[in-house]
Image (cartoon, helix red, strand yellow):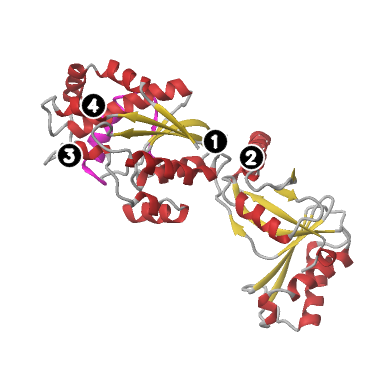
Amino acid sequence: MTMSALGEPCVLLKLGEIVLKGKNRELFERRLIGNIRDALQSVGIQVDVRRRHGVVAIFLPKGATAEQADAVAERVADVPGLVWIHRAWRVAKDPDTVLKAGLELAGESEAAKRGAPFAVRSRRRDKRFPLSSNELDRFVGGAINDEYNLPVDLKNPELTIFIEVDRDEVFVFTGGIPGQGGLPVGSSGRALVLMSGGIDSPVAAYRMMRRGLHVDFLHFSGIPFTTSESIYKAYALVKKLDRFQGKSRLWVVPFGKAQQSIRTSGQDRLAVIAQRRLMLKTAEEVAHRIRASALITGDALGQVSSQTLANITAQDNAVDLPILRPLVGWDKTEIMAEARRIGTLEISELPDEDCCSLLAPKRAETRAKIEDLKQIEKRLDAEELCVQLADSIQEYTL
């Protein structure tokens, strides 16, 4: 595939629900463009990102290779707010040039070499183009059929040549990479994720990134009664998730001594819920300091004893900030499948000393009473303790 035959390599991005945002669409698109530019800094290629009607086009510098365009496409595929990423060719806005590009693209495809059925799908965003979409389909499709003797199948083609006529050029491409969908990160505000080393919380963080939240991460370590393994694991998970949003921050709270205080409070069956409430109170204090407007957890209803409806209600009572639980209706199989897809499952399954293992009663309470928990917190002076814990946090930047 040569540049002289197909023009210049570029990347065409299709927007998802952003197009439904009405008068606010401009704000969402500006945020998305900024996120795309930030993400592409790691690729090391100077690009020109331009908005079009319903799409975003990324133009590479003159002389760029198809491999460089592939690298750009793969990187932006991780940016929430996009539903499809197409590795396209930018050709002159002329029917004969478009025809030559379509023939070239079809001829070099593996499907055409096998004699597979094909179709041409055209879209004319600029109505000044001399051929309508249907006329362009027949014009290019007829030439491909004559040149390569390929059967036409408009319902289930193995090869599809896409032609999109834009304001200043025509994009020609085949296939594409599915995007992350959702909204641009940062368009919905900022939140703080309670990040364990398990499977659930990284998936919860990712799901809320897709809803436009930029998230920071708060990890509770069992130090000084555990090793630093859980911190390394949390850091690895945050680094894996960072490709979806960039500029991630991990905060670590040394929580071991606070857990020891809960253990000696004499309420063994309530220890886990008391711990969760103290974590949430500490997270709320940290969230206020970093200007986060919500907390995020990986809770799924009924998955473990601390996640019964009564216990979730008791935890919500501990703080004033909203607690977002994007996985509340998911089962473990669904969560694991999503973790595998986004690349966090393998890290989450690594062994470590989780701080929660320090408080593991033989029989946990499934219907905790808020008044009983408040009595424990009164003895611990939980309000002051959570401030002290917030004061002790350490920041880990990527």
Q: Tell me if residue 322 is in the magenta stretch.
A: yes
Residue 360, numbered circle:
3
Q: CA distance from mark 4 to mark 1?
A: 31 Å
N-terminal of the pair, mark 2 or mark 3, is 2
Hey, what amino acid is under mark 3? Ala
Mark 4 closeness class: few <14, some 14–19, many ≥20 residues within 10 Å: some
Label 4 residue SS: helix
Residues at circles 2 and 1 in contact by the CB criterion of under 8 Å: yes
Residue where numbered disc 4 is placed: 257
Question: Which secondary structure, mark 2?
Answer: helix
The part of the image, by quadrant, that contains residue 137 is bottom right
Q: Tag 2: residue type?
A: Asp
N-terminal-most mark, 4 or 2 = 2
Work out how far the residue at label 4 is from the one at label 2, CA to CA, in angstroms: 40 Å
Nearer-N-terminus badge (1/3): 1
Amino acid residing under circle 4? Lys
Report x, y in % for residue 37. 67, 41
Residue 320 visible somewhere in the drawing? no
